[in-house]
Image (cartoon, grey):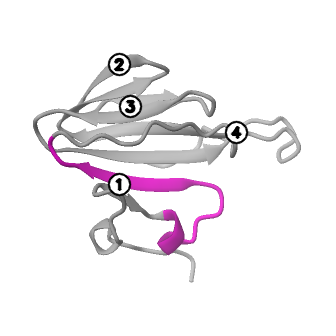
Amino acid sequence: MTYRKVNYEEVDQVSSAMHFLSDPLETERVGVTVARCDPGWNSQPHDHTENDHEEVYVLIEGKATVIVDDDPIEMETGDALWIPPESTRQIRNGDEESAFVLVSAPSIDDDEDEDGEWLLSGFAG
C-alpha cells in the first residue's frame, strides 16, 4: 500500500482533547495530532528537549492562547506557531471550543542529507 488513511474521530482521545495520529498512520519521521479543545481546557506544560522535536501548532478553529516559555501568544483561526524543542509549551483554551493540528518532527540531522536541509520547493498544491 502506498498510503494510509485514518479519521481522527475514530482514534481514541487522550487528555480529553488529543487524537494522536502517528501510530495509526504508522509515520516514521513526523508526528501529527488533532486537538479538539473544550472550553476552559488546558494542556500540560511540556517541552521536547529529550526527543529534539520542533513543533508547529496550526489553529484551524476558534481562538486560544499558547504559552511558550511563559510568553502568552494569542492565536486565531488560521494562525500557525513554530516552537523549538527546548521551549516549554502549553495550550490554554478560552470560553469556546477550539481545534489545532499539531505537527512535530525531529530537527534536521546533518548526516541524513548532504546539505542538511529539507527540500522545501517543488511541492504541488
Task: Return the disc, 2 or 1, that comes first in the chain's sequence.
Answer: 1
User: Label 3 sits on what residue type?
Assistant: Ala
Gap between marks 3 and 2 measured at Cα: 14 Å
Distance Cα–Cα, label 2 vs label 1 = 21 Å
Q: Secondary structure at mark 4?
A: loop
Which circle marks residue 34 in the picture? 1
- Tell me the kind of residue under disc 2: Pro
Q: Amino acid at mark 1?
A: Val
Neighbour tally class for label 4: few under 14, some 14-19, many 20 plus, Cα within 10 Å? few
Q: Is residue 13 above or below residue 112?
A: below
As drawn, 30 above or below 10: above
Q: Magenta stretch: give its range.
A: 22-39
Between label 2 and label 4, give the one nearer the viewer: 2
Tell me, for residue 107, which label it has, or none.
4
Is residue 27 found inside the magenta-colored segment of the image?
yes
Quadrant the N terminus occupies: bottom right
Pointer 3 local density, CA inside 10 Å: few below 14, some 14–19, many at least 20: some
Image point (80%, 41%), residue name: 109
Quarter of image, res 118: top right
Q: Which residue is mark 2?
A: 72
Of the numbered discs 3 and 2, the one sitting upstream in the chain is 2
- Mark 4 vs mark 3, CA separation in Å: 18 Å
Q: Are marks 4 and 3 in contact (CB under 8 Å)?
A: no
In the image, residue 4 lies in the stretch drawn in magenta: no
